[in-house]
Image: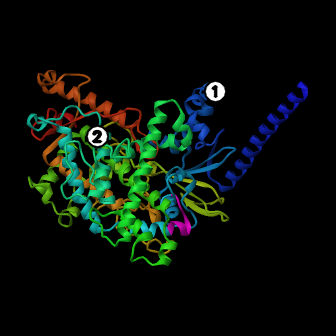
């Protein structure tokens, strides 16, 4: 009996080992046929068991000779392209390569020509929606669907993304920025001319972005602790913006969104019944967030449906949610259109995506931009000079969108945002897949390669945006590196030599209008990168619907902040305020350099869950001070 059991177990192990190596060999043969360079790796870099256990497996693998694992382990590390730059591509001598495991073959490319062709050929290279299953947990949506289903979602959701609502966003971003500044300065802060040291900048920008998208996207007036609800607020909406949980809820709407996004992976991994009964704080925290969020969204959906059925018009904001609900419940919507439209779960799913896409991505970019400007005082002064030229000391509430937005995006404000997005795009890669049932070809560096049906293709946004093949560059004055493409240099956007244009004709496009903003992602007066080399919002038919809204928000917030204030790195770790006050110029310069070095190192440690951001309590401490009250202001000393 024991022998039989041992024999059966041995046979099972032998079969598993045989299957593993047979699959490996089969995939290697497929990779060879493409003609592309490739790494043979032992596991799928995107496999859940590998990613969850990478901190266990990596030290074990490193016991082997370094030549075996050095570059292979790099490409199996999450966000390897952000943390290692051009290292892997330079080692292989190519901008496009494969990883081959027994479980899958993955393509990685930082070739702008390949990226441009793939993003334009939507039918041949559809979105790899399996990679976005996490974001369909509350209902299918415009991000997690393809083919005709996606067309429907895109048509319904794109209606609100127009210039009228971009102007509305501009005003709301200004209003919320002033609320954020009042909160950060607190009582007496304006009198002193400085905030306390801020270690919560990421959280503060998240709150700012949620408040903006809450109003312009859903008509909800979300508050800062220093604010009160306006008297004319729709009574039905007050509970969503309340600073205290309304009846039937244990946390506020804002808290439910914040916590749901914070624990999104936990929500995916653990089923509801486990979260509800596990005797751990994280489980109770996560379950409470999810339950409250879904309850709020259900109530909001029903409120909006009643308005639509009664023929009531939107009272607040651009109201994306209202537009979605109108597609099913509106009195002017035909029965045929209602039947072909979105169901309740899809409306909630799209609302969730609008919150994620209009909240987390913008907040992270703003957080990184402010931190980079604190690290680079000379750049900050240049931005302030342009703000002064545009607005002087005028009240931001009087700023006019149509009059000012183009000048803002063409100024150092726009250049700083573009440069932040180039260095730290919201997502480091964009997943596509070769369409089922048909192989496809790509041309890279003069050679044509056939890609097999079903191949996963990763468009490396963070890599191509630092690829010296497609960007003018020179040796770094900051680090001495061969190129300055890892440096934050908004001046690069004033290059007069353009290598490409966003107005190039897309010969392989299908000619369909998919809605949303159709213009360039950068000002016409700026450097125009080769198509495919600047993709913070992706490109082609599946480019980000809200990219115009995001750029408008970020231009507004930076202009409001830097019109009257400067942002400095906090130096509390090394010196007290009194000690700084008594330092000479050389000592202050040395002190600030310490802060600059640590802050840059911290930004380089950003990682992705949904988007690229700082995790695990990492932060860049800063202070916001009135202009003229700066302690580290000498650009010549600090540049």
Residue at which label 1 appears: 64
Q: Nearer the viewer, residue 426 or 309?
A: 309
Question: Predominant secondary structure in magenta?
Answer: helix
Q: Residues within 10 Å of mark 1 (few under 14, many from 20)?
A: few
Q: In which quarter of the image is the C terminus?
A: top left
The alpha-carbon separation of the residues under discs 2 and 1 comes to 39 Å
Which range of residues does the magenta coloring cover?
A: 144-151
Q: Residue 371 carries which label?
A: 2
Determine whether the residue tagged by mark 1 lies in a helix, strand or loop: loop
Residue 141 at least partly seen: no
Q: In this view, does 391 lie to the left or right of 445?
A: left
Residue at x-position 45% and y-position 65%:
540
Q: Residues within 10 Å of mark 2 (few under 14, many from 20)?
A: many
Residue 386 in picture, x, y percent from top left? 16, 53
Verify whether residue 145 appears in magenta: yes
Residue 327 in picture, x, y percent from top left? 43, 70
Q: In this rendering, is residue 239 above or below 250?
A: below
Q: Nearer the viewer, residue 593 or 333?
A: 333
Residue 180 at least partly seen: yes
Residue 377 in picture, x, y percent from top left? 21, 40
Which quadrant of the view contains residue 3? top right
Q: Residue 160 carries which label?
A: none
Residue 525 in picture, x, y percent from top left? 26, 63
Which quadrant of the view contains residue 570? top left
Q: In which quarter of the image is the N terminus?
A: top right
Determine whether the residue tagged by mark 2 lies in a helix, strand or loop: helix
Residue at x-position 33% and y-position 41%:
476
């Amino acid at each position: 009996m024991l022998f039989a059991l041992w024999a059966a177990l041995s046979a099972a192990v032998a079969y598993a080992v045989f299957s593993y190596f047979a699959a490996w060999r089969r995939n290697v043969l497929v990779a060879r046929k493409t003609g592309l360079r490739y790494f043979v790796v032992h596991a799928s870099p995107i496999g859940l068991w590998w990613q969850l256990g990478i901190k266990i497996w990596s030290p074990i693998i490193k016991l082997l000779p370094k030549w075996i694992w050095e570059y292979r382990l790099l490409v199996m590390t999450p966000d390897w392209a952000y943390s290692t730059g051009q290292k892997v591509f330079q080692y292989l001598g190519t901008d496009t390569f494969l990883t081959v495991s027994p479980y899958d073959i993955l393509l990685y490319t930082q070739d702008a020509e390949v990226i441009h062709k793939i993003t334009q050929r939507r039918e041949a290279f559809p979105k790899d929606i399996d990679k976005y299953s996490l974001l369909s947990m509350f209902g299918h949506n415009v991000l997690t669907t393809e083919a005709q289903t996606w067309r429907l979602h895109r048509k319904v959701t794109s209606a609100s993304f127009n210039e009228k609502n971009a102007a509305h966003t501009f005003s709301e971003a200004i209003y919320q920025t002033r609320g954020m500044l009042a909160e950060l300065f607190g009582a007496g802060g304006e009198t002193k001319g400085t905030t306390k040291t801020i270690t919560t900048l990421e959280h503060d920008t998240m709150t700012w972005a949620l408040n903006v998208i809450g109003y312009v996207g859903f008509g909800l007036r979300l508050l800062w602790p220093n604010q009160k609800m306006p008297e004319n607020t729709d009574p039905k909406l007050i509970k969503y913006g309340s600073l205290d949980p309304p009846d039937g809820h244990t946390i506020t709407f804002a808290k439910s969104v914040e916590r749901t996004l914070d624990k999104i992976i936990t929500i995916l991994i653990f089923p509801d019944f486990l979260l509800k009964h596990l005797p751990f704080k994280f489980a109770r925290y996560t379950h409470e967030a999810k339950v409250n969020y879904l309850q709020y969204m259900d109530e909001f959906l029903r409120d909006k449906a009643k308005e639509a059925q009664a023929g009531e018009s939107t009272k607040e904001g651009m109201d994306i949610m209202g537009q979605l609900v109108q597609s099913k419940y509106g009195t002017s919507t035909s029965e045929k259109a209602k039947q072909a439209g979105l169901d309740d779960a899809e409306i909630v799913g799209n609302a969730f995506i609008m919150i994620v896409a209009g909240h987390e991505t913008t907040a992270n970019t703003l957080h990184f931009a402010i931190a980079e400007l604190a690290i680079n005082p000379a750049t900050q002064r240049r931005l302030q000079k342009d703000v002064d030229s545009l607005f002087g000391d005028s009240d931001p509430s009087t700023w006019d969108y149509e009059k000012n937005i183009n000048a803002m995006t063409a100024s150092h404000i726009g250049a700083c945002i573009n440069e932040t997005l180039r260095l730290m795009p919201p997502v480091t890669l964009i997943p596509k897949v070769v369409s089922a049932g048909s192989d496809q070809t790509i041309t890279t560096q003069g050679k044509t390669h056939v890609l097999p049906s079903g191949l996963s293709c990763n468009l490396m946004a963070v890599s191509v945006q630092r690829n010296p093949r497609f960007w003018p560059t020179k040796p770094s004055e900051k680090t001495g590196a061969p190129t300055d493409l890892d440096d934050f240099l908004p001046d690069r956007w004033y290059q007069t030599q353009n290598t490409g244009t966003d107005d190039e004709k897309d010969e392989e496009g299908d000619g369909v209008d998919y809605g949303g903003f159709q213009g360039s992602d950068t000002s016409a007066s700026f450097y125009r990168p080769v198509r495919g080399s600047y993709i913070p919002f992706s490109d082609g038919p599946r480019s980000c619907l809200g990219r115009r809204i995001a750029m408008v928000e970020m231009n507004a917030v930076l202009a409001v902040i830097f019109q009257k204030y400067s942002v400095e790195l906090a130096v509390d770790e090394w010196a007290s305020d009194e000690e700084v006050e008594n330092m000479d110029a050389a000592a202050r310069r040395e002190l600030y350099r310490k802060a600059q070095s640590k802050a840059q190192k911290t930004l380089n440690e950003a990682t992705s869950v949904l988007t690229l951001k700082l995790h695990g309590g990492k932060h860049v401490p800063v202070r916001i001070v009135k202009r003229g009250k700066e302690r580290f202001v000498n650009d010549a000393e600090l540049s």
